[in-house]
Image (cartoon, grey):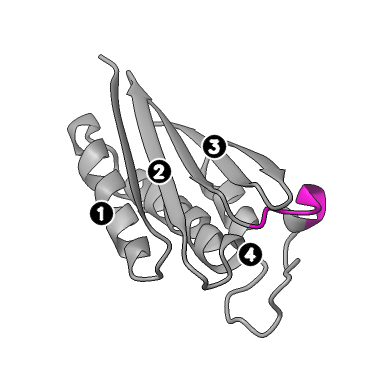
Amino acid sequence: MKNRFEIEFSALSQNEAFARLCISAFLLPLDPTVNEMSDIKTAVSEAVTNSIIHGYEGIGGTVHMSAETDENIVYIEIRDKGRGIEDIEAARKPLFTTKPDCERSGMGFTIMEAFMDKITVVSEKDKGTKVTMTKKLRG
């Protein structure tokens, strides 16, 4: 059976934990393994953090998150209306960052790609970014 949710929240760093909790609660009925849940929560954290830190650069805004399940496949979308990514291919390379002074910078997309089966990034300068992630759960 298909299921879906959509939320939006302020682009504040404390809401990264909120996004993790939301996706966890949503996925519990599918009985994911501990590793699957951890992978998905980590990927969501990275996408949300990118929106907050890079999309809005600390000036505020709104992060939109939606997820859908279809049997044992999970589809997650994180989007913002921030500054966008000028060069998506460069941004997806390990250790690439526009914020070298930030701890953890440069690994967000690499982590998302390692933990999810597929990620798609669509971005337009000054209009925002949409990250879509897919993962098939055991089953």
Mark 2 vs mark 3: give the one in front.
Answer: 2
How many labels were placed on the picture?
4
Q: Which residue of the protein is positioned furthest toward the bottom in this rendering?
A: 101
Residues 49 and 32: in front is: 49
Residue located 26% across and 48% down the image: 22
**Residue 60 drawn above or below residue 89:** below
Q: Which residues are magenta?
A: 83-90
Quarter of the image with the C terminus is top left
Q: Where does label 4 land, which residue?
A: 107
**Residue pointed to by mark 2:** 65
Which mark sits nearer the N-terminus, 2 or 4?
A: 2
Which quadrant of the structure image shows residue 118? top right
* Placement of the N terminus among the 4 image quadrants: top left
The kind of residue on which mark 1 rests is: Leu
> Reading the chain from its start, which is encountered first: label 4 or label 1?
1
Q: Is residue 3 magenta?
A: no
- 87 in the magenta segment: yes
For badge 2, the amino acid type reads Met
First along the sequence among labels 4 and 3: 4
